[in-house]
Image (tube, rainbow, N blue to C red):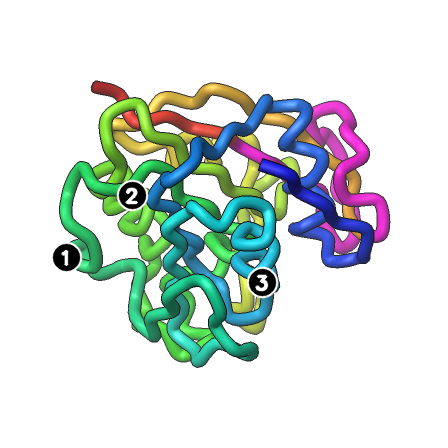
Amino acid sequence: MTWTYDHSDPALMLFTAAIERFNLTFPPHALIVELGCAESDWLDRMHRADSTFELIGVDARPHLRDAVGYEVRVDDAQRPDLFEPDTLDRVVLLGALEHFGLGFYGDPQDEDGDTRTMQNIARWLRPHGFVYFDVPCQPTHRVSENRHFRSYSPASLTERLIVPGLVEVNRAYSLPEPHAGVWCHEPTIERCPYWFAAVLAQRVS
């Protein structure tokens, strides 16, 4: 895969840095799903990187660009029957998981929508398949006052997002935008707006 990115979207900047740090791999002909795809051009870039990928994007909102070389579904990642079990090679969430279940973007409200989504991913992935995600991170867990997003503490990230069936392979913490992808220590003090955590987890056999 030939991935290039030289702009300022923090989630894509973080993903670009994680490719090298985590040794992220996407084998040819892989079935790859991006959850929360409406605002990102990640699917376009992945199709250009390797046209053999089978790419599917899912979002509660309509996609903002023409889908060329991939499929887009307006649907809810909290729905367990969205994909068949044991079928996906890779799942990617870029600046998305922290919103799931809060209803800010018109998705169904469920306080545990983030956890339910990860439980679904653990079912959908093939054995040894991978999920990559990034989330805001602070020393303490919280939901923003306007219910836009969650900020995870290192402990709550593990408790809520590394669900049975997944094993964490790698985690790294990053400075926020405009320095996303600059790796740093685990957050121990509050930062405005927040730190980032990038995580790679694998479906166990």
Above or below, 141 against 39 in this view is: above
Asked where in the image residue 15 lies, by quadrant, the reply is top right
Tell me how far mark 1 sits from mark 3, CA to CA: 29 Å
Q: What residue type is disc 1 on?
A: Asp
Tell me how far mark 3 sits from mark 2, CA to CA: 25 Å
Tell me how far mark 2 sits from mark 1, CA to CA: 11 Å
The quadrant of the picture occupied by the N terminus is top right
Foreground of the two, 57 or 140:
57
Of the two numbered discs 3 and 2 on the same chain, state the one appearing first in sequence: 2
The quadrant of the picture occupied by the C terminus is top left
Q: Secondary structure at mark 2?
A: helix
127 relative to 47 in the view: left or right: left
Above or below, 163 against 141 in this view is: above
Q: Is residue 10 visible?
A: yes
Residue with the mark numbered 3: 144
Relative image position of residue 166 (x, y in whole percent): 31, 27
Q: What residue type is disc 3 on?
A: Ser
Relative image position of residue 7 (x, y in whole percent): 81, 56
Q: Which residues are magenta?
A: 178-199
Relative image position of residue 76 (x, y in whole percent): 30, 67
Of the two numbered discs 1 and 3 on the same chain, state the one appearing first in sequence: 1
- Label 3: how many residues lie within 10 Å, few (<14), some (14-19) or many (20+)? few
| Residue 81 numbered mark, or none | 1
Q: What residue type is disc 2 on?
A: Ile
Residue with the mark numbered 2: 121
Magenta span includes 195: yes
- Label 1: how many residues lie within 10 Å, few (<14), some (14-19) or many (20+)? few
Q: Considering the whole magenta stretch, tell me its main secondary structure.
A: loop
Magenta span includes 115: no
